[in-house]
Amino acid sequence: MIRCENLLDASAIYNIHTQAFERENEAQLVKSIRHSERYIPQLSLVAEVDNTVVGHILFSYIDLVGEETLRILGLAPLAVVPQFQGEGIGSALIRIGLETADTMGESLVIVLGHPQFYSRFGFQPSVNYDIESPFPVPEDVFMVKPLANYQEKYQGKVVYPPAFQEV
């Protein structure tokens, strides 16, 4: 079952990210975003198996700076506890998150991740859309997914909020 996170899920979400990444950086990122104006409650989703939260995905607002500064979505982080990885839980979280973002009228999602995985959901290298990564990373790992509300004006350089500096 996939649903929006609630107040009772905070410690489980922290543990999921700590276990999946074997460090606390991503768990702290979720905590920081949750307490910022960039947080979107409808796009912080958890996956449950037998009433236990085993996965989490967070989409939050980031900026795209070009001729104007536009608000877009960043997908980060995504985690599933190790014993449930490889069962499609992460994929389900992504699909439902993207569908929700689309119905909310969002226009574009950015992710830094494995191209072989994220391309299955329609993500493409950001350079194909004249969108620049703020990090020196290979072109194929910084990706975008246009949603139904996408327009050509979405070009420029991605700027992440301060919460991302510690990841």
Image (tube, rainbow, N blue to C red):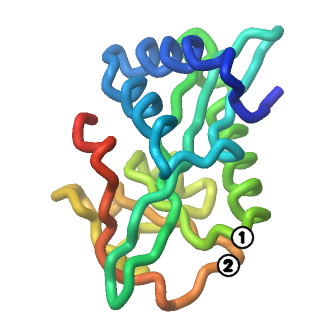
Task: Identify the mark nearer the N-term, 1 or 2.
Answer: 1
Q: Dot 1: few (<14), some (14–19), or many (≥20) neighbours within 10 Å?
A: few
For residue 142, above or below residue 82: below
Q: Identify the residue at horizontal 42%, vertical 59% (top origin).
A: 62
For residue 24, what is the image quadrant?
A: top left
In the drawing, does residue 55 fall left or right of residue 112? right
Residue 35 placed where, x, y %? 47, 36
- Disc 1 marks a residue whose amino acid type is Gly
In the drawing, does residue 167 fall left or right of residue 130? left
Q: Dot 2: few (<14), some (14–19), or many (≥20) neighbours within 10 Å?
A: few
In the image, which disc is placed on residue 149?
2
Q: Identify the residue at horizontal 27%, vertical 35% (top origin).
A: 167
- The residue carrying mark 1 is 105
Instruction: Inspect this view and state whether residue 29 appears.
Output: yes
Residue 152 placed where, x, y %? 52, 90
- Disc 2 marks a residue whose amino acid type is Asn
